[in-house]
Image (tube, grey):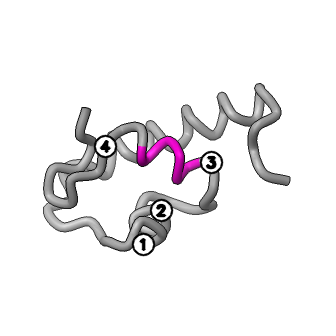
Amino acid sequence: MYICVCNAIRECELRDAARRCPGDPDAVYEALGCRPQCGQCLDDAAELLIAERTRASAEGLAPA
């Protein structure tokens, strides 16, 4: 599923980036080589980042 249509960022790509990159959606988008355009995805992206980082931390997958 696409989280960001403007940049064609898929959910799996954002989840992977959430585990590798600290920060808010803007920082993660920058790590993916883009930036938010219309902004409609930012709330969903922020929720996904929190959920993925929480899951990764609980499973011991988060970077130290």
Q: Which residue is mark 4?
A: 10
Q: Alpha carbon of mark 3 to alpha carbon of mark 4: how far?
A: 15 Å
Q: Earlier in the sequence, mark 3 or mark 4?
A: 4
User: Is residue 14 covered in magenta?
Assistant: yes
Q: Alpha carbon of mark 1 to alpha carbon of mark 4: how far?
A: 15 Å
Q: Amino acid at mark 4?
A: Arg
Q: Quadrant of residue 61?
A: top right
Q: Which residue is mark 2?
A: 28
Q: Which residue is drawn at the image coordinates 33% and 45% (left, top)?
A: 43
Q: Amino acid at mark 2?
A: Val
Q: Alpha carbon of mark 3 to alpha carbon of mark 2: how far?
A: 10 Å
Please state the horizontal and vertical placement of residue 38, each as a whole percent of the image.
Answer: 14, 62
Q: Amino acid at mark 1?
A: Glu
Q: Which residue is drawn at the image coordinates 23% and 50% (left, top)?
A: 4
Q: Which residues are magenta?
A: 13-18
Q: Mark 1 packing: few (<14 Cα in 10 Å), some, or many (20+)? A: few
Q: Which residue is mark 3?
A: 19
Element assignment for label 4: strand
Task: Say which mark, if any, is on residue 46.
Answer: none
- Kindly indicate whether the residue at mark 2 contacts the one at mark 1 (C-beta within 8 angstroms): yes
Element assignment for label 1: helix
Q: Quadrant of residue 55?
A: top right
